[in-house]
Image (cartoon, rainbow, N blue to C red):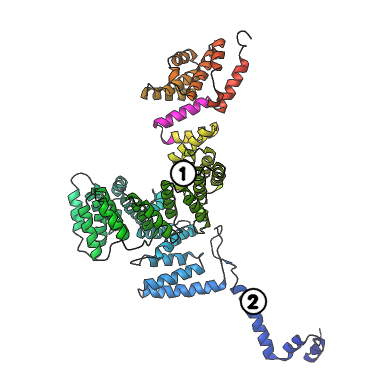
Amino acid sequence: MNWLNKDELAVKLERFPLLRQMLFEFWFRVIVLCGLLGVIFLALFLPKMWVTSPAGFLPVVKVSGLDFAQAWSLKRTARQAMAAGRYEDAAYAWQSAFANNPGNPKLARGALENFLHLERPGKTAGSAIQQALWLLRLTGTNTVDLELAARVFEKNRFYEFVLDLLDARKDSLSPALETAALKSLFHLGQMDEFARRWDLGGERLKADAELPLYHAAYLAGAGPVGTQAEGKQRLDSVLSDPARRTLANRLLLLVAARRTDATLYEDALHRLEEHQEDALLDHVGFWRLLAATGRKDEAVQLAQAYPHPPSAPAETVQLAQTYAALGLRDYALEFLQRYAPKFAYAERVWLTYAQLLMEAKQWDDLRELALRIRREDTVRDRLAGFSFYLEGRAELALDRKENAEAAFQKVAGARFENRALGLTTARNLLRLGDPAAARDVLLKLGPGAEGDFTYWNFLFAAANELKDTDLMLSSVSQAYKLRPNDVPTMNNYAATLLIHRLRPDEIIKLTVQLRARDPRSLAATINHAFALLLNQRAREAEALLRTVDIAKLIPAHASLYHLGLFDACVAQQKFDAAWRASGKINLQHLYPNQVKWLEETRRRLPPRAGE
């Protein structure tokens, strides 16, 4: 092959001046090459094209090369600040690093670990809670991150969050998580469960430096008779210890509240104030205790004079609820109007605001609140279903029924990430007479509901209103498995089996038990008669039904009574009596299975006398 020399190549490139210039001028080639590399670099560095979130994670987190570089630099700055004990400075650096690359769990962990060093978290509390929840989504709730998140929630006094977080794993908790659960149980006043789990925990829990103080507080406020003095003495003995006095005083506040001892509470609160260790919620507890002990006017004065604003959602919720409990509901609503936007990411703030508006029957404001919730990016997806419920509730109260129905239909199509909120919404929909929407909400909450008796009870109630007999059977069967001795559940289970004409041996046992518990119950008597019929004991069933005073039956039970009498007469070939009973049955009170059986049986009967 003959290669062209430089001069020959120049002739070939005569019509391409830029290429000729690159051929003959070295520095021009360098400049062009640098420019090309710069374009490639910018194309890779500026667009958000690098996925940093785990596979399958939604929303997908994409960052640019610039984001990577800034996050790395800020992380380095944050670590240097932490090493020097400048945790406030480190907090801002960690927040900025996390904002640049939220898909990196190490940045969230760093921010949360720094948060735990802050003496007064203030404005960073809200972002710490959000980061903790985000971290758990990123990493799939591994034990290390669960422990970190639990400590963050505990620092913010989000004790319900701690228990909700650990509920699914409560039988396999690490010592650190069991400790967090015990502390949360104590703060939420669940003393029996605290004592039970303390006894089960044994020595592995006593290694924690703080838990023995919690146990002392339990003895002082809720322990067995004769342990109160011992428990209080243990707490008093550490009041001079700077490392433990804050916790001891705060536990004494809880003991005083449980004992309804305003003097003990006030003394502990003053000690906290002396060392500037008091918190807003400590004062809120004092106002509530004063009101409970007949000093409401004093409580109102202190509440209205308190100068410090809330720094966390829990404080906002407690303040608003306390204002309302003290008779300052308008003041509470003004307070929430001012502070709800500041803590817009916190579900509990919006739920409290909505509850107070409903109690005040301020329906226009409630409707506006529903719209505000859907405009808030931080809670829009999580609270969309609830916001449509609020809108429907307001429209219903304003007598705009079509608008209410449209809103409730949107509730049914929404997704509830908060299971407890979904159950509450479904219950409220049932109360408002929309069982179809309630059923749709509940069916979406089905995964993981195997051991939730309340869930199956609500689902049965919705199915019963809709006369969906298949759903009635599946839901009440689950409820009965969980609580086989609960009388209402036993009754619902027996009635549903009767509707389906299933398991006659089991039904007869149930109806015998139910009648024995309440011999005067007309419903139990009718159900037992149906059980006798299923067991081919028509004569006994008719005799039992004849003892019922029809005048005392409500219309629905009267139709069931005549359906049972019809069945008994058909079985004994008393066809004229069967036709008479049939004519007194109101089909609107029957379930589809019963209507179908009745119509099929009627077609098989001989004609009425005289026809």
Residue in front for this viewpoint, 311 or 201: 311
- The residue that mark 2 highlights is 40
x and y, in percent, of residue 515 in the image: 39, 22
- The residue tagged with tag 2: helix, strand or loop? helix
The earlier-in-sequence mark between 1 and 2 is 2
Task: Give neighbour class at mark 1: few <14, some 14-19, many 20+ (Cα, 10 Å).
Answer: many
Depicted 432 relative to depicted 299: above or below: above
Query: Dividing the picture into quarters, in which one does residue 486 lie?
Result: top left
Task: Locate the C terminus by quadrant.
Answer: top right
Mark yes or no: residue 289 visible.
no
- The residue tagged with tag 1: helix, strand or loop? helix
x and y, in percent, of residue 504 in the image: 49, 23
- The residue that mark 1 highlights is 423
Give the residue drawn at x 57%, y 11%.
Answer: 575
x and y, in percent, of residue 70 in the image: 51, 74
Q: What stretch is highlighted in magenta?
A: 481-502
